[in-house]
Image (cartoon, coloured by chain):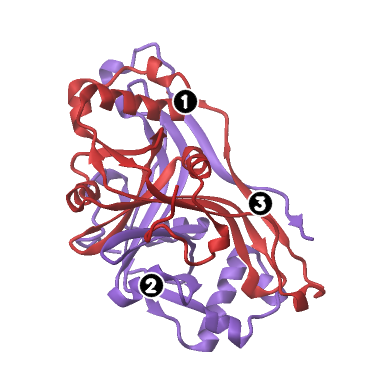
Chain colours: A purple, B red
Amino acid sequence: MQPTEKTRVKRGPKRATYDTEAIYAILDEAFICHIGGTIEGAPVVQPNLHWRIGNKLYIHGSVKNGLIRSILQSGQTCITVSLMDGLVMAKSAFHHSVNYRSVMVFGKPVIVEDPSKKIAVLDALLEKCMKGRSKEARAANDIELKATTVIEIAIDEASAKIRTGGPIDDPEDEALPIWAGVLPCETRWGDAITYP
Amino acid sequence: MQPTEKTRVKRGPKRATYDTEAIYAILDEAFICHIGGTIEGAPVVQPNLHWRIGNKLYIHGSVKNGLIRSILQSGQTCITVSLMDGLVMAKSAFHHSVNYRSVMVFGKPVIVEDPSKKIAVLDALLEKCMKGRSKEARAANDIELKATTVIEIAIDEASAKIRTGGPIDDPEDEALPIWAGVLPCETRWGDAITYP
């Protein structure tokens, strides 16, 4: 997609991408997003789950959630998703860095009102968590559906930033006898635990 | 610490804690935070590194970073840190959940101006990444120090939310022949990779 005034990355533009597939891949791999808005004029950032169907990003929450109410009222939000891949240890303190992949989506949050669409969208969240789960779980009843607000945001205005690889030191530091490298990290899924 | 109007958790208050040590533990385990502010009236959430010394939270960035400039100008930010521990699979679609630990810190960002304090604070970030690193790495020179803004926020107004354990289904669903449990996840560190 095309960068806009909001999404054009000013700091570290070489790490920026506006490639739709790259943006989708980061959104799809991550479960936790951070939703930005304001409450009574003050910035508020809340973690939430997010998921994607086509070029739409979804979040959900209680109808009583103050931040969700606030972003609906203001008609704007920024949803940011970040995956950390490693700490980058340079020879110089200044050039230490992080390998990461992040996406910022700016857009107008809209409530998914249509009940059948709302069910399909919530099913997609279950499927993201566990394939086949939307067919297995006891479906939401009317009261449960009404207690949940599902929000759709078109992924029209978004950017990604990606850093990979090793440290980049200044040429004059390269010969210093200091270890340099990457401490990789990843989100690892463990064996499922059955309850009760 | 005492909850305030901003930090008192309204949704899911049973998962909330204002215990200082619990808040510090989450901040210390996580590397990535999400900084909230506004730019030209629109919410913006950016990922960044954060670290802590005593009751002060620190972030840093380029002196040209628009969000950092904006939160300094407005005198307010919300910094949120989230760790995901697992997906919670209930028998009912509605009671699916996430095991997580998150912290929201509200406060006034202040620039660390004093050069020796700034060096000590940046050293603490290196130490968080790798013990002993601040003694090994080539120290920042004056130009590098000036290119970095270090921001301090007192951790006076903060809350944590923690969910642990298995799914909590409605009593009438408990006998349903549907698997229920937790898909645990964690951030795992891999073996260090040496560059070049």
The circle on residue B69 is none
Question: Whole-Å distance between the Cαs marked 2 and 3?
Answer: 29 Å
Helix, strand, or loop for circle 2? strand
N-terminal of the two: label 1 or label 3? 1
Disc 1 marks a residue whose amino acid type is Met
**Residue A42 appears anywhere in the view:** yes
Instruction: Identify the image quadrant of residue B95.
Output: bottom right
Q: Position of residue B88 (x, y in %)?
A: 65, 61
Helix, strand, or loop for circle 3? strand
Residue receiving disc 3: B184
Q: Position of residue A103 (x, y in %)?
A: 38, 56
Please say if B51 is above or below B192: below
Marks 1 and 3: same chain? yes
Helix, strand, or loop for circle 1? loop
The circle on residue A153 is 2
Please say if A30 is above or below A86: below
For mark 3, name the chain.
Answer: B
**Residue A168 appears anywhere in the view:** no
Q: Position of residue B10 (x, y in %)?
A: 47, 66
Disc 2 marks a residue whose amino acid type is Ile
Q: Residue at x 82, y 73 (%)?
A: B177
- Foreground of the two, B151 or A107: B151
Q: Are marks 1 and 3 in contact (CB under 8 Å)?
A: no
Marks 2 and 3: same chain? no
Q: Residue at x 66, y 80 (%)?
A: A139
Q: Are marks 2 and 3 in contact (CB under 8 Å)?
A: no
Please say if A90 is above or below B183: above
Q: Position of residue B76 (x, y in %)?
A: 26, 52
Q: Residue at x 59, y 81 (%)?
A: A144
Residue receiving disc 1: B130
